[in-house]
Image (tube, coloured by chain):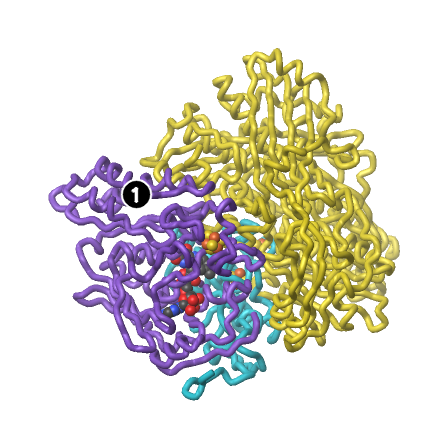
Chain colours: A cyan, B purple, C yellow
Amino acid sequence: MNTQDSHTAPAPGVTLLVNGTRHHLAIGPEVTLLDALRERLNLTGAKKGCDLGQCGACTVILDGKRVNSCLVLAARAQDRPITTIEGLAADGRLHPLQQAFITHDAFQCGYCTPGQIMSGVALIEEGRGHDEAEIRKHMSGNLCRCGAYANIIAAIREAAART
Amino acid sequence: MQSFTLQRPSGLAEAARLGAEGGEFIAGGTDMLQLMKEWVRTPDRLVDLDPVLDPRIEAGPQGLRIGAGARMEAVAVHPEVARIAPAISEALLESASPQVRNLATMGGNLLQRTRCGYFRDAGVAACNKRRPGSGCAAIGGENRIHAVLGTSGQCIATHPSDFAVALVALEATLHLAGPDGERDMPIHHLYRTWDTHPEQETNLRPGEIIAAIQVPATALSRNARYLKVRDRAAFEWALLSAAVGLEIDGGTVRAARVAMGGVGTKPWRMRAVEAALIGKPANDDSYAAAAAHATEGAVARGENAYKITLMPRVLARALALAGGAA
Amino acid sequence: MSLIGQPLPRVDGPDKVTGRAHYAADFPADRMAHAAVVQSTIARGRITGFDLAEAEQVPGVLAILTHRNAPRLGKIPEIPPVDPVGTPEHPLQDDLVLHQNQHIAVVVAETLEQARWAASRVRVSYAPEPAVIDMQATLRHARPASKDEISAKPGNVGRGDADATLASAAVTVDSLSVMERENQNPIELHATTAQWDSDGERLTVWDKTQWVQSCAKHLGAAFNIPPERVHVIDPFIGGAFGSSLRVWPHTYIAAMAAKVVGRPVKLVLSRREYYGGTGARPWTQQRVRLGADRDGSLQAIRHEVTAENSRYEIYTENVLKATPILYRCRNVDLPYRVALRDVNSPNAMRGPGLATGVYALELAMDELAVALKMDPLALRLRNIPERDQMKDLPFSSISLEQCLTEAASRFGWDRRNHQPGSMRDGRLQLGWGMAVSNYPAEKVKATARARVTAKGEVHVATASSDMGPGTWTSVTQVAADTLDLAMEQVKLSIGDSALPMAPVHGGSMTISSIGPAVRDACEKLRGAVYGAAGVNTGDILEIARRIGRDFEAEGAFDPGDLEERFSMEGFGAVFAEVTVDPDTSEIRVRRITGAYGIGKVVNPLLARSQCIGGMMGGIGMALLEQTEIDRRSGRFVNGNLAEYLVPTMADTPALDVTFVPEEDRNVGGLGTKGLGEIALVGVAPAIANAVFHATGKRLRHLPMTPDRLAMA
Ligand SMILES: Cc1cc2nc3c(=O)[nH]c(=O)nc-3n(C[C@H](O)[C@H](O)[C@H](O)COP(=O)(O)OP(=O)(O)OC[C@H]3O[C@@H](n4cnc5c(N)ncnc54)[C@H](O)[C@@H]3O)c2cc1C
Ligand code: SF4
Ligand code: FES
Ligand code: FES
């Protein structure tokens, strides 16, 4: 194997910048961002529902964009800002979308909820939070098996109207 | 996933060389990681293309130049893409989810592997694509999503990309960077059909990288449309799809580009349909008559027979959309 | 003002929106090891050998357990009402393979990645035996379910003479329908974290379970320790829909693994592993024959079901529960048949049995309305039952008629053109359909404890769980209401096997059973506090603080002989509008209206959520969901969440929910009837009937995917 002029990931070690805090983890490139958050950093707010990009429960915001953290190698998220559900409430005050989820009962079991909220926050940032048809379409990567969608739509609209 | 080495080349040439030496490319990783987690692919070396791929989207008089590193979402919402080739925006906005689109690259999109459930389950013994020579479990099995065109007794899998269908209709060109230099390749040369080697899906040479995608700006591209048919309203690959561009002058079809997805082993250009449209009045009757040619040579394999029933209807509808119907 | 009936937000809302709510895989433990299962790749046969060489090479591997070296388990008990009849899988105990994706080994390693990697490298050799998977082949050997297998569920026993009446009826329909296997697919993956104490005598388990105490009993029996020494914890369930009623093999495997490595072990099934590692709503074929007079009065019903089953257990469900009571009819025949194949055992999924049976019955009723040239609504109204003819008991209450008329008027049913294919919206075909919903108002024994401390804190506890309906909130409401306190003043504990006995969290009976037990405990607590203070009014917090000691009371609920006096049933009516694209054969639901008579509604905000969730589940059942099993190999071809399709937000129609006022003084407890299941039951048939109305095509196979419509 010729790696003279390429930079093989220095094994082991990845630095993650999560919710404003820098963490150094002794992990190899096979660890996903989701597993790094959940199993190494004990940030279990991001959930695993499929591990294959198919449910959205693991959604976090990476470099300002919503992504499935199960499809990101932690090593490739090195030093890039990551926001998880744990980092959304500022000094203990709920983000408007978190509050709107409570008001509109936009969840039941709550398992998809962190992913829905992170996705919803990004959707509002994308400017898609005002139109119901847009919300439906661009939130469809977040499955909710409890079927709380109608209430999630209401919550997003309310939060979008406030921001 | 198993442990592997992640190689970070400093340029395309180096990446191509690492690829030619047996490293597997990873760009957005959205398909690669699905396959690795399910043990369908077990590379021990991944070559990270992300830092070396061009993410830019540029519009010029020639048309669109989309860097292979551009994210699906960025392309989907790009105003110039919507203006020059709305079929591309539509195909991308109907693909995957915003989260996936934020990760997935355009090059990776074209090279994603089939959704055949037998291919993606490493516990299935017979899959020629995954284990050459092992057989094809989809023939005689659950093949609702499988192809009716271009199949063989070896494999009946469809290519799942929506974007690729639009590119085939728009006659896009790929810029490739390989270990031995660069070359261009028309999109329809990218995918192979197979009688014997379904594991060989593309005509890329070892180490060759898709660097950019060039889409010509034409009257056809500007009114081309993408229609996608699926069970649920979002977040699903196409059961069938159609990308259609028409040039209509004085109520007569002057030029037509037609491709379908979900029906062939690769995005399927429908030349017979195109030929049947030229010179015909731009109306529903001509569309229906031309669309009937779509199923020429189609072979049903059981549960996918409905595709042959739906193809003309879906295509006629797509033609009507491209022709300006609501 | 009473808190009961108030639309209060969830008390667990702040935890759920901040990621603080901990589910089974979210509990940290020191020195946690990770486990990954190896699953079978044949459907039937024996394991002849394992080659572990490559797996053992993987760094970090702590142990690999197979049937050759795994700890021996005791006999796993059969605990009603959840466990089926037969011999459950005793994982890693022998070389037998009963189905595909059966756990046959487990790898424990330092990290999750290592465990999964090593598991992928375990090589297994088999002596396969011929397996029968294909349903058509399986049906040829279908047989009647035995009395034991059916136990208390309706089936085989009917009334009158259906065959003779059908032969002479003025109008008859004969309706055959099929429903594919469906998977519950809660978004939470099935997970168990197991930890033994240092002397190996006590086991703590964080498990995704709807019944912590049954889980403790199962594990106790399997590991030969008293159930009190098994502590099962699950305060939050990430959805279940029946998938966590049983104790599945992986739960034992996690505990075995923890025992062997002497460390806490976390085992999370992947989405693919889940399909073979748990159960599913069974594939069914139903044939409903109806006989009626020309005015629509039903004279005979013959409803036959044939349900898939595994070869090692027989799971039957209430498929035929609604049929003999939903409509006034003297002659009813209810054959229940089982068809065994080499698959994993089916189990209960939301609205178990009734969702399946009511689909077929309501499809047939729609066909009867067509045959009679009658408004389907009028046909239902014509046959409203006066009493439960099966049990020969009065209903505790029945609001079926009100539900039908209320939902019909909200929906605008009177504007329906009854001619199929007659309504359009531009290019799209429009269809309106309706169906009735029903689910028994079950309630069983339950207990609870309430305590007020000298500091003036109130703690209420019961071993129940909350998979989403809102147990946390509704039970807090009952306690706060009874004690005349604010919601924030009551601290509830649930989801812990050490708490007072509670029944399985399923079958829509949680609030009906737990609610009155909590109320009883709270009333007794108040009595004790007042008694000690010699008062009969006042703030119990203040009194307890003044007296300066803790008070505690146990409460219980026992439905007693209620079941013998009344037939207790919830009823509903569901109306749906669909569009059908004639070019693409895509079917989309535009709106659904449901009206339900379910007794007292404890919290209308949460109740509405249950109903809209049930409607989404019904959309999935009607249009999307099917577990594709390869008919030769038995592999799950769509064993993921990309090709097993559940509704997305884009599939969400306008949803309209109402509860008809229903004050039921006979139903006992709090006057509630339960809601989680009835919300799903009538939805799929309403959609199916709407598809017929739109297209004139009777699709008899769920889900109604574009391929089925195109070929119909
Ligand atoms: C849940 C889900 C739903 C989806 N739905 C849709 C859908 O509806 N429609 C649709 O079209 N797609 C869909 N996709 C697929 C998605 O679009 C692809 O996974 C994605 O585009 C792949 O891009 P990537 O950059 O992530 O590729 P990677 O996963 O990184 O790579 C994919 C393959 O391409 C190779 N490769 C990548 N880039 C290059 C390059 N520049 N040159 C040469 N080789 C390269 C890699 O070696 C690998 O073999 C979905 C994906 C997910 C996860
Ligand atoms: S269709 Fe192709 S990919 Fe699918 S099982 Fe057959 S060979 Fe494999
Ligand atoms: S866990 Fe990442 S999308 Fe499902
Ligand atoms: S709230 Fe349960 S999955 Fe969404």
Please tell me how crowded label 1 is: few (under 14), some (14-19), or many (20+) other residues with Cα within 10 Å.
Answer: many
Q: Is residue C379 above or below residue A138?
A: above
Relative horizontal placement of residue B31, taking residue C186 as reference (left or right): left
- Ligand 1 shows up in the quarter that is bottom left
Mark 1: C-beta under 8 Å from nearest atom of ligand 1: no
Picture coordinates of residue B17, whole percent (x, y): 38, 79
Q: Is residue B37 above or below residue C593?
A: below
Look at mark 1 in the image and give the residue it sits on. Answer: B294
Residue B114: image quadrant is: bottom left
- Visible residue check, residue B81: yes
In terms of depth relative to the viewer, which is nearer, C324 or C137? C137
- The three-letter amino acid code for the residue at tag 1 is Ala
Quadrant placement of the N terminus of chain B = bottom right
Return the residue found at the far left: B250
- Visible residue check, residue A59: no
Relative horizontal placement of residue C638, taking residue C349 as reference (left or right): left
Element carrying mark 1: helix
Picture coordinates of residue C502, whole percent (x, y): 78, 50
In terms of depth relative to the viewer, which is nearer, C122 or C267? C122
Residue pictured at 47% horizontal, 41% vertical: B303
In terms of depth relative to the viewer, which is nearer, C185 or C530? C185
Residue C539: image quadrant is: bottom right
Residue C513: image quadrant is: top right
Picture coordinates of residue C400, whole percent (x, y): 61, 29
Quadrant placement of the C terminus of chain B = top left
Picture coordinates of residue C389, whole percent (x, y): 71, 23
